[in-house]
Image (cartoon, rainbow, N blue to C red):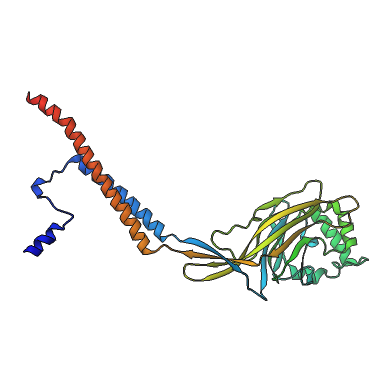
């Protein structure tokens, strides 16, 4: 009996007899409000526990011998597809003119609607002779001049999109009329100042997208009026690995950019173009998805629910005493 009595003395939650408990309307109201608040806080804590967060880590980039995918989607509203080419050069000296690796050109009318599609390799095969930087004309060149002039008069534009696979070294790629025979280009535009390289960058990325990524050039519009020039985008690529909560690893890249525009001057021998000059950072960023521990969730849940329960208990006692103080004087005056 002594042991049982000792255990009873340790009870931190003594219970009163049923007939000693008094239930009130104010207590019921406080209880309902408290239950609603606890339910809301429980759902908030559960959502907080199930939501992942990211941790960033940096290390030296050790990748070697891999290619760099460049996803491009750019619209030139004032240049027909026949005159545009995509060229690339890197620090190793590799120079590719009029690239034909997974690049498409969409012909657009003056309203931006698609009126034709051509794979870039088809254009290379069709117009290889006229796209060389040599002299002289042939029937194909004359036919292309007529076709391009007609397209310019109709306000045709072009969307260039696809994927370039380049070596993982610093370099640049540019979209321009450089693939044209220089005499053909002169016949079409009557001078470099009339080549309108206005453009809209719908998408430019260097790998697949992960949650939360921001590509700073997406949605960029550069529209020229009565002038032309050379656009240069200086891009710093940061190799990135995104590790999902289920351990899947997504290798990609993020980047920062600055831009520069050089207007064309009279007697300038160069032709307008849009350059993307890129360099790679020696540091790679690893972004890991993580979830809070279950013990952390239980700790927060106990603190929140326990605090709410204690606060509603205090509120109930204050309301009971307030109502008792208000009703007791009235009861005494009635007895008198």
Q: Which residue is found at the position 86% from the left and 63% from the top? A: 143
Nearer to us in this view, 158 or 1: 1
Q: Quadrant of residue 319?
A: top left
Horizontal arrangement in the rendering, residue 226 relative to residue 51 (left or right): right
The answer to which quarter of the image holds residue 107 is: bottom right
Q: Position of residue 289 (x, y in %)?
A: 49, 64
**Residue at screen point 51% across, 62% down:** 55
For image coordinates 65% across by 65% down, the residue present is 206
Res. 5 image quadrant: bottom left
Furthest residue toward left? 1
Instruction: Report how many numbered discs are placed on residues in the image.
Output: 0
The answer to whether one can see residue 283 in this image is yes
* Residue furthest right as drawn: 136
Residue plotted at (76% across, 56% down): 232
With respect to residue 335, does 279 lie above or below?
A: below
Residue 110 on image: x %, y %: 73, 51
From the viewer's perspective, is 153 left or right of 68?
Answer: right
Pinpoint residue 308: horizontal percent, then vertical percent: 29, 48
Compared to 209, does 228 lie above or below?
A: above
**Residue in the foreground of this view, choosing between 304 and 194:** 304
Between 230 and 237, the one nearer to me in the picture: 237
């Amino acid at each position: 009996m002594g042991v049982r009595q000792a255990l009873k003395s340790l009870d931190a939650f003594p219970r009163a007899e049923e007939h000693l408990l008094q239930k009130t309307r104010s207590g019921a109201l406080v209880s309902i409000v408290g239950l609603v608040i606890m339910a809301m806080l429980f759902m908030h804590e559960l959502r907080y526990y199930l939501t992942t967060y990211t941790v960033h880590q940096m290390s030296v980039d050790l990748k070697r011998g891999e290619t760099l995918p460049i996803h491009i989607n750019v619209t030139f509203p004032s240049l027909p597809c026949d005159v545009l080419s995509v060229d690339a050069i890197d620090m190793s000296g590799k120079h590719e003119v009029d690239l034909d690796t997974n690049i498409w050109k969409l012909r657009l009318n003056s309203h931006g609607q698609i009126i034709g599609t051509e794979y870039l390799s088809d254009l290379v095969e069709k117009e290889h002779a006229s796209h060389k930087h040599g002299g002289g004309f042939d029937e194909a060149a004359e036919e292309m001049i007529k076709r391009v002039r007609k397209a310019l008069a109709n306000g045709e534009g072009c969307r260039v999109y696809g994927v370039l696979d380049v070596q993982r070294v610093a370099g640049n790629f540019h979209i321009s009329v450089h693939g044209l025979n220089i005499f053909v280009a002169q016949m079409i535009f009557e001078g470099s100042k009339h080549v309108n390289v206005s453009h809209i960058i719908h998408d430019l990325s260097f790998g697949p997208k992960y949650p939360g990524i921001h590509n700073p050039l997406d949605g960029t519009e550069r529209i020229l009026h009565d002038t032309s020039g050379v656009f240069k985008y200086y891009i710093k690529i940061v190799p990135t690995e995104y590790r999902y909560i289920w351990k899947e690893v997504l290798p990609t890249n993020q980047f920062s950019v600055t831009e520069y525009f050089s207007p064309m001057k009279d007697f300038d021998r160069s032709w307008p173009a849009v350059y993307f000059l890129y360099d790679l950072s020696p540091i790679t960023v690893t972004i890991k998805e993580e979830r809070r521990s279950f013990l952390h969730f239980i700790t927060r849940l106990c603190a929140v629910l326990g605090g709410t329960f204690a606060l509603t208990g205090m509120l109930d006692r204050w309301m009971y005493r307030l109502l008792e103080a208000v009703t007791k004087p009235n009861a005494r005056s009635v007895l008198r």
